[in-house]
Amino acid sequence: MQNWEKRVINPLHNRRNVIAFLIGGAALLQLATSHKPTPPEVSDIPHLDLEKAKEWIAAGAIVLDVRGDEQFKFRHIPVAVLIPVDVLQTAIPAWLLAAKEKQIVVYCGDGVAHGPQATRILVKAGFQHAANLTVGVEGWDKAGLPLTRG
């Protein structure tokens, strides 16, 4: 086998080719991952831990469950009002607009997806005291806090 044939058959035969191969692979990986949709940032909205959420609720905060109807029927925080995030994306109900100055605890299942999304909608609409419950109803339940079921 001639020298040029070895290079064609085995391009990793020397250190320079190995480095070039690794750099090219890293560039392709970066390109491939740069086009994946990224989840919305959750750092740009206010958040509440369980203790702070309980304080707000005890003080009369509005509690919004932004999941779907079936999840709400399965279990929800006793004083919660259901307004699915899809509804908030379309229009904020008039009664809620009238309560812009009140504290609002927003929650979803795990505090990661719909809760932050709904909180962001409210904050952009001028609700200065809306905050996402970071642990959602899952964390509320795991903490042994009361839930309405059915």
Image (tube, rainbow, N blue to C red):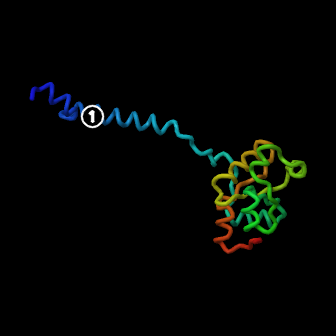
Residue 6 horizontal/vertical position (percent): 15, 30
Residue beneath the point at 47% across and 39% down: 33
Left or right position of 116 against 148: left
Task: Estimate how packed mark 1 is, as few (under 14), some (14 to 19) or many (20 or more) residues with alpha carbons within 10 Å.
Answer: few
Figure label count: 1
- Quadrant containing the N terminus in the rendered view: top left
Residue beneath the point at 63% across and 54% down: 112
90 above or below 76?
A: above
Query: Label 1, on which residue?
Result: 19
Task: Specify the quadrant of the image occupied by residue 67.
Answer: bottom right
Residue beneath the point at 85% across and 49% down: 100
Residue beneath the point at 79% across and 65% down: 57
Residue 80 horizontal/vertical position (percent): 80, 63
Residue 129 horizontal/vertical position (percent): 78, 52
Task: Name the residue type under label 1.
Answer: Ile
Residue 60 horizontal/vertical position (percent): 84, 63
- Quadrant containing the C terminus in the rendered view: bottom right
Looking at this view, name the residue that lies furthest to the front: 1
Circle 1: element type: helix
124 above or below 48?
A: above
126 above or below 141?
A: above
Left or right position of 18 against 68: left
